Amino acid sequence: MRYVHTNIIAKDSKALIEFYKNVFECKSIGEKRDLHGEWLDRLTGIKDAHIIGEHLCLPGYGEDHPTLEIFSYSDMIENQNKNVNCCGIAHIAFEVNDVKKTLEKVLKAGGGQVGELISTVYPNGEKAIFVYATDIEGNIIELQSWN
């Protein structure tokens, strides 16, 4: 058994793919998708489902890697506002060298910031810096750095 991918359904998959490539150095690996057909209708439970998007290799991984799958459906339903304390999958996280600089990159690319950038010391003495940010569609991203 192994972990395969995380999927984000995007209002604009092309723009969101570029955001993750530019800000988090995710890489195209030739796994673009343009999916439709009776099998997809049966799988999704959606009549005439049509998905476009791409799998991106996450930073820090080699050939045998999990991916970030960013898709758009031709017919989508808007979701409520995303919050860090909502039930379900709350965020994705990236360990970065410099949280402040990466947050600046997120903001410059059109993303946002959720709370404050904080530094803390865990009971075992390990120091960490964290901040919650958002991508250009409001999906929450945790940025973290450990010393």
Image (cartoon, rainbow, N blue to C red):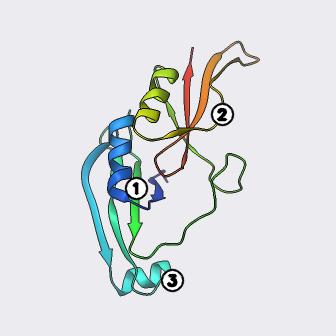
Under circle 1, the secondary element is strand
Q: Position of residue 99 (x, y in %)?
A: 51, 23
- Circle 2 sits on which residue? 115
Q: Position of residue 2 (x, y in %)?
A: 48, 51
What residue is drawn where x is 46% and y is 27%?
104
What residue is drawn where x is 40% and y is 65%?
72
Which image quadrant: the C terminus? top right
Q: Quadrant of residue 123?
A: top right
Q: Position of residue 62 (x, y in %)?
A: 32, 37
Label 3 sits on what residue type? Gly
- Circle 3 sits on which residue? 45
Label 2 sits on what residue type? Gly
Q: Is residue 95 left or right of residue 60?
A: right
Q: Is residue 65 visible?
A: yes
Check the image and report above or below for 56 versus 128.
below
Decide which of 5, 12 is in the foreground and name it. 12
- Circle 1 sits on which residue? 69
Q: CA distance from mark 2 to mark 3?
A: 37 Å
Label 1 sits on what residue type? Glu
Q: CA distance from mark 3 to mark 1?
A: 20 Å
